[in-house]
Image (cartoon, rainbow, N blue to C red):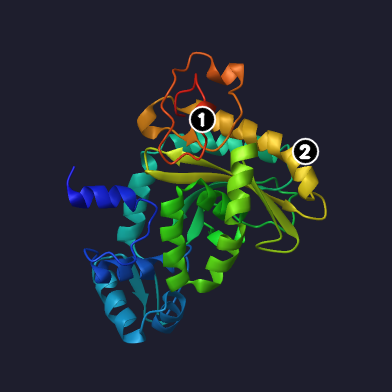
Amino acid sequence: MGRRSERLCRKSHGDIGGESDVIQVVSRAFDVLRCFESADARLGNLEISNRCGLPRSTVSRLTHTLTRMGQLVYLPRDQKYRIGPSAVAMSTAMMRGLQLRNLIRARLQDVSEQIPGTIGFLIPDRFHLVYFESARVPQTVGLHSTTGSRIAMAQSAGGHAYLAALEPEVAESFLAEIEREEPGQALPLRQRLEASRAMLHDKGYVVCCGLFNPHVNGIAVPMWSPQYQTHVVVNIGLLAATYDEQRLHDEVAPVLLRLKDAIEALVQNAENGLVAVGAKRAPRPEVAKGLSAVRRPAHSLAAPDLRRQGQAPA
């Protein structure tokens, strides 16, 4: 493996700050595309500039180039941009090959019928988590995150669980980058890091209350994805008036951990699988039956004697 490949492996969590071999114009182009949080979002250059912190002149050049490439479309009547056909086609082609997605969606829906909250399977995108899949019953009120929604790492139990799952040096690099780019997010993440690590190690999940909204409490579990070479997260958000912190531990945590087990058991192919980190629990017999043991990923915080046997990555 060459030096550049080794650096990419170490930087798989998305931290590109300080890398001399990163082409900044490419990085900034993706920053512009990230501003479009939904397919129907319409933004002008000034709005994009404010969202991604780039000079308006730079944004103007980037949006012009992205429009010529089909990644954006210019709407003359509104004098705004929206996601273009090339971006949609590219994402659609990627989604078509992810058979695991439908299986995960079904498991999330099963849990949403037991727990009156928003159940999400989230993937990291720099300093945010994106709902790759989500489920909630129609009666759920006050919780509106859906597939494609973005939430800041610092404002969700999922973000704190994600950071807690990283190796210490990787987490520190991530925090240093977020302190440069979005200092408001860095402080709450750093303040809770040790407590989140301890909870993840002892219980296998992380609980955070009132981060995104004082009326919403959350609980999350991270998993390592060999396919994406990063941690992904299963998150449950509930109304604080109904589910206080103790109830999250007593009633919701067992459901979340069973959901994690179900996701692990969905796919036995290691390339597309997920491996849990941080948990001390042994696998349920019905989950472990017939599955071969795998090596604990290097990113896991669990001690060597806590390695779980009898499970293939799911």
Q: Position of residue 238 (x, y in %)?
A: 72, 51
User: At label 2, which amino acid type do we have?
Assistant: Asp
Residue bearing mark 2: 250
Would residue 297 appear left or right of 260 to someone viewing this image?
left
- Residue 119 visible in the picture: no
State how many labels appear.
Answer: 2
- The residue lying at 39 percent from left, 81 percent from top is 45
Who is closer to the viewer here, 114 or 75?
114
Would residue 45 appear left or right of 121 to someone viewing this image?
left
Q: Look at the numbered disc 2 and give the secondary structure of its residue.
A: helix
Disc 2 crowd, CA 10 A, few/some/many (<14, 14-19, 20+): few
- Residue 282 visible in the picture: yes
Residue bearing mark 1: 264
Picture layout, residue 170 above or below residue 24: above
Picture layout, residue 36 above or below residue 248: below
Q: Earlier in the sequence, mark 2 or mark 1?
A: 2
Q: Which quadrant would residue 95 be assigned to in this image?
A: top left
Would residue 302 appear left or right of 208 to someone viewing this image?
left
Q: Look at the numbered disc 1 and give the secondary structure of its residue.
A: helix
Who is closer to the viewer here, 178 or 73?
178
Q: Which residue in the rendered view is the most extreme toward the left?
A: 2
Give the distance between the C-alpha atoms of the residues marked 2 and 1, in whole angstroms.
22 Å
Q: Position of residue 67 (x, y in %)?
A: 28, 71
Image quadrant holding the N terminus, namely top left
Q: Look at discs 2 and 1 and give the one toward the viewer.
A: 2
- The residue lying at 28 percent from left, 51 percent from top is 8
Q: Position of residue 216 (x, y in %)?
A: 72, 57
- The residue lying at 69 percent from left, 38 percent from top is 253
Q: Position of residue 13 (x, y in %)?
A: 40, 52
- CB within 8 Å, label 2 to label 1: no
- The residue lying at 41 percent from left, 46 percent from top is 230
User: At label 1, which amino acid type do we have?
Assistant: Glu
